[in-house]
Image (cartoon, helix red, strand yellow):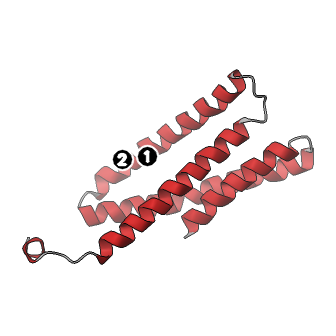
Amino acid sequence: MLLYVTLATQAIVLLTFSYIADSQIASAICIVLMATFGFATVAPIQRLVTDNARAAGAPNLASVVNIGLFNLGNAIGAWAGGAVIAGGFGYATPDWAGAFLSAAALVLALVSGVIGRNDKQLPVPASAADT
């Protein structure tokens, strides 16, 4: 639940920042909120990944891949922000790109949560329970 809240709030803060970027005080508040919700997203994601990996029997591999995917996410965010600036959309539009990426991450988290819930409700076949 915390993951959903942090991703949604991150998208909202980014969209808000694009509209109030002219105000120094409001911009400072948005920057603090972006950092807060950005860091608040890390722990729930790591917990989700390690819990699922532990259930699959590969927690160490998941921890390594998780860090790599955080780095990939940073690179994609930087690329998207640079692409909208290079496209001539202005210096406030990286916020829109970030909000889109946060919203996309929220959708993926929600889908993952639904799939995870459905997997836990499926009956385990007798032959699989014996292994």
Could you tell me which residue is drawn at 66 percent across and 47 percent down?
Answer: 99
Q: Where residue 84 appears, x then y in whole percent?
A: 68, 29
In the picture shown, does residue 70 fall above or below 36? Answer: above
Crowding around mark 1 (Cα neighbors within 10 Å: few <14, some 14 to 19, many 20+) is few
Q: Quadrant of the C terminus?
A: bottom left
Could you tell me which residue is drawn at 84 percent across and 48 percent down?
Answer: 28
Amino acid at circle 2: Val
Could you tell me which residue is drawn at 74 percent across and 55 percent down?
Answer: 33
Please state if 101 lies on the left or on the right of 12 as rendered.
left
- Where residue 74 sits, quadrant-wise, is top right
Amino acid at circle 1: Ile
The residue indicated by pointer 2 is 64
Please state if 9 lies on the left or on the right of 26 as rendered.
left
- Where residue 12 sits, quadrant-wise, is bottom right
The residue indicated by pointer 1 is 67
Question: Which one is nearer the viewer's eye here, 131 or 117?
Answer: 117
Residue 77 circle label: none
- Mark 2 vs 1: CB contact within 8 A: yes
- Secondary element under disc 1, as helix, strand or loop, is helix
Q: Where residue 13 appears, x then y in whole percent?
A: 74, 53
In the picture shown, does residue 78 fall above or below 100? Answer: above
Q: Where residue 91 appears, x then y in whole percent?
A: 78, 30
Please state if 19 lies on the left or on the right of 37 as rendered.
right
Q: Where residue 63 appears, x then y in whole percent?
A: 37, 52
